[in-house]
Amino acid sequence: MLLSPLAVKRVCAPVFCRRTAARFGSLARKGLILQSTSNSVYENLAVEDWIHDHMDLEQKNVLFLWRNSPTVVIGRHQNPWKECNLHLMREKGIGLARRRSGGGTVFHDLGNINFTFFTHKKKYDRMENLHLVIRALKSLEPSLDVQATQRYDLLLEGKYKISGTAAKLGRTVAYHHCTLLCSADSWLIPVVLRSPYDGIQSNATPSVPSLVKNLSQAHPSLTCEAVMDAVANEYSLQYDDKPNVHVVDPRDEMLFPGITHKKKELCTWDWIYGKTPKFDVQKSFQILHKNIVVDGKLNMSIKNGYIESCVMALPSHWLSEQHCWELQNSLLGSKYCPGEIVFLVTTLLRTFPDDDELHTKWNMLCEKLVSIM
Ligand SMILES: Nc1ncnc2c1ncn2[C@@H]1O[C@H](COP(=O)(O)OC(=O)CCCC[C@@H]2CCSS2)[C@@H](O)[C@H]1O
């Protein structure tokens, strides 16, 4: 008989079963702990997807431990332009990812740990998981003042958020994932999660900002490594087991057949930006040209991340209706993204090669557009 410690549905991954049976040892384990070797948010989210889609969690629970290089992670139904400063993130090389669970936006770096608790849907219990994390923290610092709130945050000293929660409930499998701030760049969090873009109307899920603090600020002994070990210990205790953390590489196609495809999907523009719920942008702006202030208005509708309608109101003595229309029209169907807009306007400029005055005006409008994306 083919037995798998990961209890993978055989039909999906026969190779995985045989290999992992050898790799992960004892078949009796009811709680399996996996820790990622990767700091790529897309690879780690792909592991979550893979476990969700392929593992049979009827008899077994899984805890997945992972950390990422600097990234902003938005919820499934959020608008990144409303939630974070995309300009600053591009400048600082901070990534953006959209996860499959709902909820708000958080910042990850190597000082932030993520825990994903996978169970059968019947056993899904977020409070139980958070209490496990609290027990782990108290095993390291018994005097630590940490509490779970009704919205499943963990608060330090009654007011500082150290952990945020989100969840995904599938047909049979459920997962609850949460962050834990140990030694993240806590100065950067409010800066990067403040959107500079105004005039966006949207029904997307808004985040709930809080004051944040790192555990290591309260107790220097609470490093990521110590906390991860303590959580793994506590998780094993729950199953009367010795801690046994299996280090896994999310790029290992033998272990996770089909995971490369899952990762690729999570990296696409159409997933990260394109899944933004439909939104409108209404913005008044001013352009200073030849010492004259020109007032303009912009109205756009964005659907699946693409510009569905665009109307610019500008004084006709400054830009003729025809030229205004040509600019608007060239943007229709384009991604709501700076690179695409610059490309389209540059292409449009080539249709009037000798009109320097028009080039200047279109370029100024292009800059305005780029500044709001
Ligand atoms: N890393 C981290 N941990 C805790 N709190 C954070 C963090 N980053 C930002 N914040 C604060 O939470 C709010 C947003 O709170 P809000 O309640 O809106 O959203 C959440 O908590 C979502 C948690 C998602 C957890 C997933 C687990 C694995 S992948 S991401 C934000 O404005 C900051 O004030």
Image (cartoon, grey):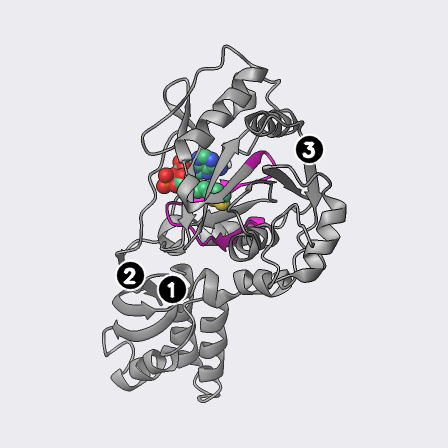
The answer to whether the residues at label 3 and label 2 have Cβ atoms under 8 Å apart is no
Kindly identify which numbered label has been placed on residue 285.
2
Q: Position of residue 39 (x, y in %)?
A: 64, 46
**Residue at (41%, 36%) from the top-left corner?**
125
Camera-nearest residue between 343 and 319:
343
Kindly identify which numbered label has been placed on residue 368.
1
Residue 51 falls left or right of residue 129: right
The answer to whether the residues at label 1 and label 2 have Cβ atoms under 8 Å apart is yes
Work out whether mark 1 precedes mark 3 in sequence or the reverse, and give the earlier one: 3
Work out whether mark 1 precedes mark 2 in sequence or the reverse, and give the earlier one: 2
- In the image as oriented, which residue stretches furthest toward the front? 1
Q: Mark 2: few, some, or many residues within 10 Å (few <14, many ≥20)?
A: few
Camera-nearest residue between 334 and 60:
60
Separation (CA) of disc 3 from disc 2: 59 Å
Residue 37 falls left or right of residue 9: right
Q: Position of residue 257 (x, y in %)?
A: 65, 62
Residue 53, above or below 242: below
Provide the secondary structure element on which disc 2 rests: strand
Please identify the quadrant where the N terminus is shown: bottom right
* Residue type at the position of mark 2: Phe
Separation (CA) of disc 1 from disc 2: 8 Å
**Residue at (49%, 36%) from the top-left corner?**
179
* Residue type at the position of mark 1: Lys
Q: Is residue 111 located in the magenta-colored stretch of the structure? A: yes
Residue 310, above or below 213: below
* Residue type at the position of mark 3: Asn
Provide the secondary structure element on which disc 3 rests: loop
Residue at numbered disc 3: 244
Q: Is residue 323 located in the magenta-colored stretch of the structure? A: no
* Image-quadrant location for residue 311: bottom left
Separation (CA) of disc 1 from disc 3: 55 Å
Residue 329 falls left or right of residue 299: right
